[in-house]
Amino acid sequence: MKTLKLTSIGNSTGLILPKELLEKLRVEKGDTVTVTETPRGLEISGYDEKKDRQLEMAEKIMRDNRNLLRKLAK
């Protein structure tokens, strides 16, 4: 477990990640990360364009077919 401190960055608040955490995430300054809410809390991961496209497609399918999915869930 690692404790980090929030800091002011202009009018925003930022979280400074130490080098070893950046290496574990396989990201560096300027990269984009994904924050996902899970039952255990928030998960930070390196941005994966392919995974993002897949999630967008899944959300669209679920939205477009919500009535069918409701019937299948019963």
Image (spheres, helix red, strand yellow):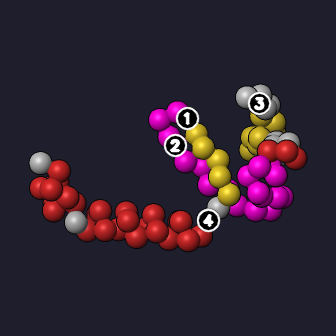
Q: Secondary structure at mark 1?
A: strand
Give the magenta part as a residue range.
22-40
Q: Which residue is mark 1?
A: 41
Q: How much space separates mark 3 and mark 1, taking CA atoms?
A: 14 Å
Q: Residue at x 62, y 55 (%)?
A: 34
Is disc 1 surrounded by few (<14), some (14 to 19) or many (20+) residues within 10 Å?
few
Task: Say whether residue 9 is visible.
Answer: no
Q: Secondary structure at mark 3?
A: loop
Q: Which residue is mark 3?
A: 2
Q: Earlier in the sequence, mark 4 or mark 1?
A: 1
Q: Which residue is mark 4?
A: 48
Q: Is residue 28 magenta?
A: yes
Q: Earlier in the sequence, mark 3 or mark 4?
A: 3
Q: Residue at x 83, y 58 (%)?
A: 29
Q: How much space separates mark 3 and mark 2, taking CA atoms?
A: 19 Å
The residue under label 2 is which amino acid type? Answer: Glu
The label shown at residue 37 is: 2
Q: Residue at x 79, y 45 (%)?
A: 21
